[in-house]
Amino acid sequence: MLGYYFELAIRSLKANVVLTLLMIAAVGVGIGASMTMLTTLRAMSGDPIADKSARLFVPQIDVWGPDSRRQDPSDQLPDQLTYRDATALMRAHRAVRQTAMYSMGMDVDPGTGRPFQASGRATYADFFTLFEVPFRAGAPWSAKDDEGRANVVVLGAKLAERVFPGSNALGRTVNLDGREYRVVGVLQPWNPVPKFYDTTSGGFANTEDFYVPFTNAVERQSESFGNQNCSALPPAGWDGLLASDCIWLQFWVELPTAAAVRDYRAFLHNYAAEQRSSGRFHWPPRVELHDVSDWMAQQRVVPEQVRVNTLIGLGFLVVCLINAVGLMLAKFGSRASELGVRRALGGSSTDIFLQCVVETAVIGLVGGILGTGLTALGLAIDRALLAPGAKNVQLDTLTSIDGGMLAIILAVAVASTVGVGVFPAWRASRLQPAWQLKAQ
Amino acid sequence: MAAAFMEILPILKALRRNKVGAMLIGLQIAFTLAIVCNCLSMIQQYRDDAGRPSGIDEADIFTFSNQWVGKPPDLPARTNADLALIRSVPGVVDAQVTNSFPLRGGGMGWGLSVKPEQRIPTSPTTIYFVDDHGLATYGLKLAAGRWFTASEIGEHGMHDMTFPASVIVSDYLARKLYPSRNALGQVVYWAPTAASRIVGIVERAQTPWAAYGHTEDEQSTFMPYHFVNSGVYYVVRARPGQLNAVMTAVQTRLYALSRQRVIDQVQSFAETRNLAYFRPRSTAVLLGGLCLLLLAITLFGTIGLTMYWVGQRRRQIGMRRALGARRLDVLRYFHTENLLIAGSGALLGIALGLGANLWLVSHLELPRMSIAFVLAAAAVVLAVSQVAVFWPALRAASVSPAAAISAL
């Protein structure tokens, strides 16, 4: 029966090409506009490390006291750690895994050709296991390397290819800021979205070119490329920074169970209490622990404008659907006499209803396909517009349609069209056959 | 006019027979209007933001980063040699070494106080390191006081916690620090023990992060320092029209002087501005395109519905024509009808649009929407709707009385 309705639908749609095209265009444009916006929002608010995001935590410590937040209505604790606290937490080693880290940069001298600057991250060996960083070759450096401030490096896929094109980088050395580093690992392409482990310079920046031990970078006095905030004038020099209450380090811990989370929170609280009793803090201890999704929300990683854009896109879809309903009413209305004849010949109102719904579903499907194309077009335009900031946004992930998104687009197209098609179909099915016949 | 008014009652009566169709057109107009006026307001906000001048000679300036390889010990001498070389390149007006510049994105910020022991600073400010060539390099306009002299210029490393005796501030910062007095000659405090005197005020100088928000965009302080660091920025101003030639020449000459460096991020200030606003610009373009599409959809949808409507009422139209109505009367009938429907929709749309704007204001850092946008959007939407109805109405007007009667 449905096959027959489908055939009827095609015939009917062909009968009034202009109205049909208008309906398909309305659905298609509505889907295209709203889904372009939704794709970006979905990519931005995705879970970057789904199987682990509830076990990774960022500790916060109130190092500046309540006075520093007097003008901040959100009353948030400092979002990074001081060198002093970060190294104390590293030494305490109270989590399964933990790392302090900061973003930096070094000059790479490839031997031939001009040296160039590459972005790096100073971190601990745990970083790679903590964040499930995929290796193409080699492995993280050892805890001993961390202790010994070893000149070892893990190369990102891009930098490895640039310095050692087409050959195995593992075990070779690379010159960073005039010092030779032994390559212990090479990563596969890895770009979590959002870049959750350090959002201080934008939540959607690309990952670093290389990774070196935190202890090595601090010993070399490699400047941070990230945010550095001080509540008071720090002492002069690099050692002054290390001793200061300036915050500039990110810190992550892995806590596998609820008990571990409780214990770590208690440990943090005790730590802050000790800082108070030793005379460093002049306020009651306050600490916080946030898992990945908490942290993304607190850091406001998804720009509010992106949410607003999505709402506007959905409003746009509503207008298009209202438009389509009007056109459907017109369409079914213009076929009133034909439907009347069917009713008079014994077709039940359910038959008419189903036939009309099948017709709207066909429009929804074709509109959805057009909408998918238009979404791709919209994303291509967005991509071109965002291209100047390619270093700060992960264009590939934010502007491409994955399988899940494709399913969402088609489902929204058919569901919304059929949903709004129910009303015109119902009206059409309630026509009095006698009236229609008489009008002939 | 009176005739048009007389028609309203019969039109309303006729509309009661097509409530759903009229409501759909009205709703569509309402939503379209609500979306368009808010988009217009956001686009205008972007244009206002991006249109703010940085205060420097944007057309002739380019910047680049210079990173010394392997931390050479004689950084100040190298910087001086670089500056002397750049300033001697033909086509160069002047040059600077600095830590940051307007719209770069990253830079240094500090809290500035007017009293030594202030718990909360009076204003945040960005800090730019400049020397006696700063005024000529940036093309800044001095509003009061003076620029730095060569003898004032000191050296400043990344972690030096020293502050100069004299500073120059932007007019905006000056007014924020001293709202009721002339800031020139006043002393400001970086810390209880660190004070500087304001010796000059420039008309305007945007911060490195001015593109990110609507606040903290012009709180800038200039310090008479050469930045001593393995990574610095050079700012070069070229003679008008010679920017591109100078951009290449400067790099070649610097590499010829020393190859122990990495020159990177070479960009004209136009590119810097382009980069700073890439996100809001993409939003503005997308929203603008969306509005045009939306109006097109509304236009074609209204045409489609009215065509159907006219088709349904062929017989009545023919009858009216037979009873003496002119073509113009029929045209006017449909236009008046549309105006009634779209006008009611527009009223609803204005309420919706203003409501949506209130929500946006509380969620985004957006100012209230000006009523002008609402009225402009209403005018556009009504015009589109009237245009849409014209062709179907013309077809209706061309219904011949004879055809209508013979169909009976």
Image: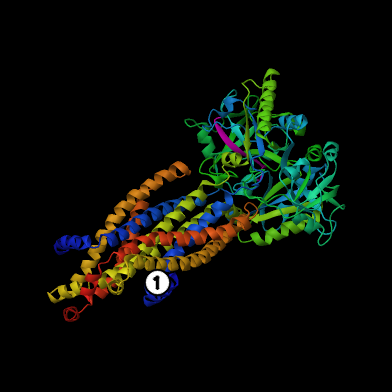
Q: Position of residue A243 (x, y in %)?
A: 74, 29
- Comparing A186 with A223, the one in front is A186
User: Which corner quadrant of the image does residue B379 belong to?
Assistant: bottom left
Chain assignment, label 1: A
User: Which corner quadrant of the image does residue B311 belong to?
Assistant: bottom left
Q: Position of residue B226 (x, y in %)?
A: 71, 41
Q: Position of residue A4 (x, y in %)?
A: 42, 73
The answer to whether one can see residue A250 in this image is no
Left or right of B162, for residue B404: left
Q: Given the image, on which type of amino acid does mark 1 rest?
A: Thr
Q: Is residue B42 magenta?
A: no
Residues packed near mark 1 inside 10 Å, few (<14), some (14 to 19) or many (20 plus): some
- Comparing B201 with B312, the one in front is B312
Q: Residue furthest front?
A: A346
- Comparing A367 with A168, the one in front is A367
Q: Quadrant of the C terminus of chain A?
A: bottom left
Q: Main secondary structure of the magenta part?
A: strand
Left or right of B384, for residue B66: right
Q: Which residue is mark 1?
A: A20
Which residue is pictured at 18% across the width and 72% down the height?
B316
User: Which corner quadrant of the image does residue B382 belong to?
Assistant: bottom left
Where are the magenta residues, as a range? B121-133
Q: Is residue A6 above or below residue A243?
A: below
Left or right of B321, for residue B234: right
Q: Quadrant of the N terminus of chain A?
A: bottom left
